[in-house]
Amino acid sequence: MVNPQREVTLHEVVAGDYGALDMRLMERVLDNLVNNALRYSSQRIQVSLTLAGSRATLQVNDDGPGIDPAERERVFEPFVRLDPSRDRATGGCGLGLAIVHSIAQAMSGEVSCRTSPLGGRLLQL
């Protein structure tokens, strides 16, 4: 179950124009990344959006268990759940990050996963 007492920090830096972004797709990406972080973090989530010229960077950091470096690319495959023991507790079907990956490709971008400064994972589009 999702802990309702989480600290979620939002940070926005705008030095560009939202006009070039498909806001419907960006909203879907943000929703999927934040919901994923809520499933696996214990206390803290940081979300930042930076616009610089025509480039947008969206980052979601969490303090969850993190992802083994050898498994990081697999999280973007459809129906992948890296920790099956958590399936019942966290819900979801393993499509959220695959959808984010597809949207990133459609927007001529990329999505990556690495260790977060908070100790969990950092997902960046």
Image (spheres, rainbow, N blue to C red):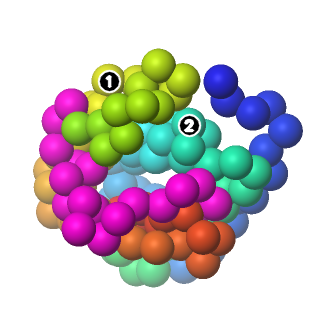
> Is residue 14 at least partly visible in the picture?
no
Question: Residue placed at 67% from the left, 55% from the top?
Answer: 45
| Position above or below: 36 against 45 | above
Which of these two is toward me, 55 or 8?
A: 8
Instruction: Name the residue beneath numbered marker 2.
Output: 39
The mark that comes first in sequence, 1 or 2, is 2
Residue 9 x/y as whole percent? 74, 58
Asked if disc 1 and disc 2 are in contact, CB closer than 8 Å, the reply is no
Question: Residue placed at 80% from the left, 32% from the top?
Answer: 4
> Is residue 7 at least partly visible in the picture?
yes
Callout 1: helix, strand or loop? Answer: loop
Question: Which amino acid, by three-letter code, is at mark 2?
Answer: Arg
| Position above or below: 125 against 106 | below
Instruction: Name the residue beneath numbered marker 1.
Output: 93
Magenta residues span: 58-79
Residue 17 x/y as whole percent? 46, 67
In this picture, residue 67 sits left or right of residue 117: left
Q: Is residue 104 magenta?
A: no
| Position above or below: 103 against 90 | below
Which of these two is toward me, 25 or 5?
A: 5
